[in-house]
Image (cartoon, grey):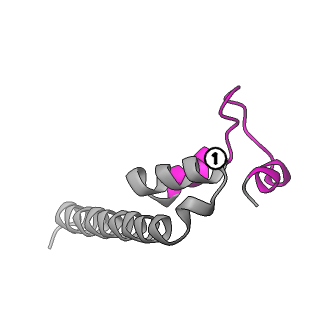
């Protein structure tokens, strides 16, 4: 098999794996929301909603970004908001 074909196959596999991972993250977030969503504060609800629609990577990016200023938060600032 040529290197080009190997790369195409590997990229397709990676894309499928990534898609499956995101689907699983979204499924997890929806389950978590049903179980605990009503007891969460607004910041955590918003972050969970991002995870329910876009997956964990997007939720982490959301949690490390100040939603009013767009500035990146430090780890300690993120933990103060999201626990």
**Residue farthest top in this picture:** 69
Residue 30 is left or right of residue 5, and the answer is right
Number of marks drawn: 1
Indicate yes or no whether the magenta region holds residue 29: no
Residue 25 x/y as whole percent: 42, 67
The magenta region covers 57-81
Residue 59 x/y as whole percent: 54, 52
Residue 52 x/y as whole percent: 42, 56
Residue 61 is left or right of residue 76, and the answer is left
Indicate yes or no whether the magenta region holds residue 59: yes
Whether 73 is drawn above or below 76: the answer is above
Residue bearing the label numbered 1:
42
Looking at the picture, tell me which residue is in the foreground, 28 or 34.
34
Mark 1 residue crowding within 10 angstroms, few (<14) / some (14–19) / many (20+): few
Looking at the picture, tell me which residue is in the foreground, 35 or 60.
35
Instruction: Choose top left, top right, bottom left or bottom right for residue 72.
Output: top right
Q: Residue at x 85, y 54 (%)?
A: 76
Q: Residue at x 55, y 60 (%)?
A: 38
User: Which secondary structure lies at badge 1?
Assistant: helix
The quadrant of the picture occupied by the C terminus is bottom right
The quadrant of the picture occupied by the N terminus is bottom left
């Amino acid at each position: 098999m040529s290197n080009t074909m190997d790369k195409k196959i590997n990229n397709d596999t990676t894309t499928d794996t990534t898609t499956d991972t995101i689907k699983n993250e979204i499924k997890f977030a929806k389950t978590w929301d049903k179980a605990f969503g009503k007891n969460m504060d607004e910041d955590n609800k918003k972050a969970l909603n991002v995870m329910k629609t876009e997956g964990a990577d997007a939720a982490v990016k959301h949690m490390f970004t100040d939603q009013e200023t767009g500035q990146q938060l430090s780890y300690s600032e993120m933990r103060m908001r999201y626990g």
